[in-house]
Image (cartoon, rainbow, N blue to C red):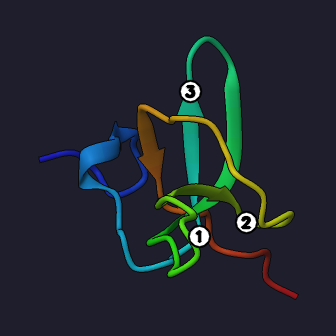
Amino acid sequence: MAEANEWQPIENAPMNGTPVLVFEAPDWIDVARWWDGDDYGHNAGWLDAALESKSCNPTHWRPLPAPPQP
C-alpha cells in the first residue's frame, strides 16, 4: 500500500471535490479538484482549485501537505 503522501494513480483520487495535488507529464503540478459537471452540458473533469477553470488530464495525485504551524 502506498504511503498517504506519495504519488498515487489518478484513478484512486477522491472524486468529492477535495483539493489535491495533481501531476501531468512531463512536469505539470497543480492544486485541483474533481468536478462532476452540470446540467448545462459542461463535462466532468479536473478543475484548477484556485481559478476554477478546466484543468489538464492528470495521471497522478497526492494529498495536500498540512499547513504550516503558527
Left or right position of 47 against 17: right
Can you tell which quarter of the image residue 70 is in?
bottom right
Q: Tell me which amino acid carries mark 1.
A: Pro
Left or right position of 21 against 29: left
Q: SS for tag 1?
A: loop
Can you tell which quarter of the image residue 13 is in?
bottom left
Q: Position of residue 66 (x, y in %)?
A: 63, 73
Precedes in sequence: disc 3 or disc 2: 3
Q: What residue sits right under mark 2 in the picture?
A: 49
Residues tagged 3 and 2 counted as in contact (Cβ below 8 A): no
Q: Residues within 10 Å of mark 2 (few under 14, many from 20)?
A: some
Whether 63 is drawn above or below 7: the answer is below
Question: Disc 1 and disc 3: Cα gap in Å?
Answer: 16 Å
Towards the viewer: 27 or 33: 33
Q: Residues within 10 Å of mark 3 (few under 14, many from 20)?
A: some
Q: Which mark is residue 24?
A: 3
Towards the viewer: 2 or 43: 43
Precedes in sequence: disc 1 or disc 3: 1
Towards the viewer: 49 or 7: 49
Q: Tell me which amino acid carries mark 2.
A: Ala
Q: Which mark is residue 19?
A: 1
Q: SS for tag 3?
A: strand
Rendered residue at 56%/27% (across/down): 24
